[in-house]
Image (cartoon, rainbow, N blue to C red):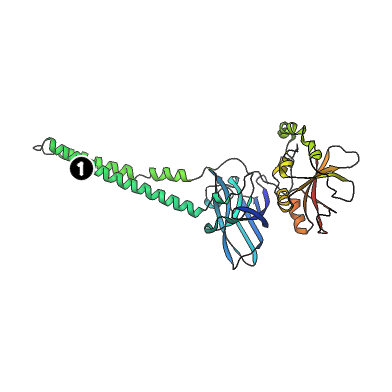
């Protein structure tokens, strides 16, 4: 089970390069030498059934290089995709799962309107997307250029050999070129061609084209949230400890709940969360947290009152209770839901998926 990984992330639409609404999720599970991929879309409306390519994201030299997994059809707003591949070499691309930074769904002729989800700290910049088909065109042109260069070199070497023969003849017209000299010239010409016809140039080019497999492991969010070792984050936590409490004095207190167990609630952003000296650093890039923030433009942070316990706080992700949201929230460590009576949220099922943290 040492190779087991499980990752679930929300998929968003990107219209003209701008991140918009949530339209589904992607689930990846690595177990027993297999990488299982499932994509589920809902609310992707098109005039007619549309076929899309499904790609893993690889960050390379500032570009988003697509590693194609397959195709899926979206009809009546719905789409499903499933596949199994080898995690050590995704679809014989030369990339392993440790190189993967997300997933996107789209077509080459409409790169600025895609569906995507990132699993790393970087954003999806649709202008940087490079489709595999484009890479093949570039490689074909490069190979054609190499072949053209080889042909030109062969012509040059033929001329050089001919000039060598002519010079020998001009040097002594009365001297008949011996059989040995003729063999030397022929060997010179053939030897040069054999060197050019060797696969070294092509081999060198193909080695440049094959990506290096990075040994660094992609940090994924597991179904069960595991706390990082405190000593790994102690240094950064001490730096944050001195000023993070000012968050309560800088923001307005929100009356979110009918009881006093969760009090002094304030609306914060993901950037504010990053200022908290949390022992679980995965929280700083938690996909469910980002999902709630993009939907409601805030995260709730406050204090917990329980039997005189000190330094106990909570982080609340806004949302509406449903079985689907319960399943997704639990994947990212937010196992509890608390209904809110906020007057600015009229939905009777509105509340917060929350997690208690010690700071």
Horizontally, is 73 left or right of 240 in the view? left
Please identify the residue farthest to the left as the structure is shown: 174
Residue nearest the viewer, comparing 96 with 288: 288
Does dot 1 land on a helix, a strand or a loop?
Answer: helix
Horizontally, is 88 left or right of 173 in the view? right
| Residue displayed at 84% across by 40% down | 312
Question: Does residue 26 appear in the picture of this structure?
Answer: no
- Residue 329 picture location, percent across and down: 75, 52
Q: Count the marks.
A: 1
Against 277, residue 353 (above or below) is below
Residue nearest the viewer, comparing 198 with 201: 201
| Residue displayed at 49% across by 45% down | 210
| Quarter occupied by residue 244 | top right
Q: Which residue is mark 1?
A: 162
- Residue 138 picture location, percent across and down: 44, 50
- Residue 4 picture location, percent across and down: 67, 47
- Residue 36 picture location, percent across and down: 63, 54
Question: Does residue 181 appear in the picture of this structure?
Answer: yes
Quadrant location, the C terminus: top right
Against 275, residue 132 (above or below) is below
Against 112, residue 192 (above or below) is above
- Mark 1: give few (<14), some (14-19) or many (20+) Cα within 10 Å: some
Horizontally, is 116 left or right of 94 in the view? right
């Amino acid at each position: 089970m040492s190779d087991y990984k499980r990752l679930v992330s929300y998929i968003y639409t990107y219209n003209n390069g701008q991140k918009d609404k949530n339209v589904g999720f992607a689930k990846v599970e690595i177990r027993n030498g297999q990488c299982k991929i499932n994509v589920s879309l809902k609310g992707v409306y098109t005039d007619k059934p549309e076929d899309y390519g499904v790609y893993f994201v690889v960050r390379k030299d500032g570009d988003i290089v697509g590693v194609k997994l397959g195709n899926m059809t979206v009809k009546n707003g719905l789409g499903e995709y499933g596949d199994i591949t080898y995690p050590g070499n995704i679809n014989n691309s030369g990339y392993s799962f440790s190189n993967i930074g997300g997933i996107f769904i789209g077509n080459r002729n409409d790169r600025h309107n895609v569906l995507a989800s990132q699993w790393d700290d970087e954003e999806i910049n649709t202008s940087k997307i490079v489709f595999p088909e484009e890479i093949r065109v570039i490689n074909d042109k490069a190979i054609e250029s190499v072949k053209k260069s080889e042909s030109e070199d062969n012509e040059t070497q033929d001329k050089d050999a001919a000039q060598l023969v002519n010079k020998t003849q001009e040097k002594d017209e009365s001297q008949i070129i011996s059989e040995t000299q003729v063999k030397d010239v022929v060997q010179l010409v053939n030897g040069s061609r054999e060197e050019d016809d060797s696969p070294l140039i092509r081999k060198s080019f193909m080695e440049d084209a094959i990506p290096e497999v990075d040994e660094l492991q992609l940090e994924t969010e597991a179904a069960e949230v595991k706390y990082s070792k405190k000593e790994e984050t102690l240094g950064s936590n001490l730096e944050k400890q001195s000023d993070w409490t000012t968050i309560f004095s800088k923001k307005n207190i929100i009356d979110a709940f009918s009881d006093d167990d969760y009090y002094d609630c304030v609306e914060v952003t993901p950037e504010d969360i990053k200022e908290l000296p949390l022992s679980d650093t995965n929280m700083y890039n938690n996909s469910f947290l980002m999902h709630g923030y993009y939907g409601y433009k805030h995260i709730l942070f406050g204090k917990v009152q329980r039997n005189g316990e000190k330094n106990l706080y909570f982080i609340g992700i806004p949302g509406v209770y449903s079985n689907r949201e319960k399943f997704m929230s639990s994947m990212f460590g937010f196992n509890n839901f608390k209904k809110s009576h906020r007057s600015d949220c009229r939905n009777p099922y509105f509340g917060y998926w929350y997690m208690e943290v010690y700071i």
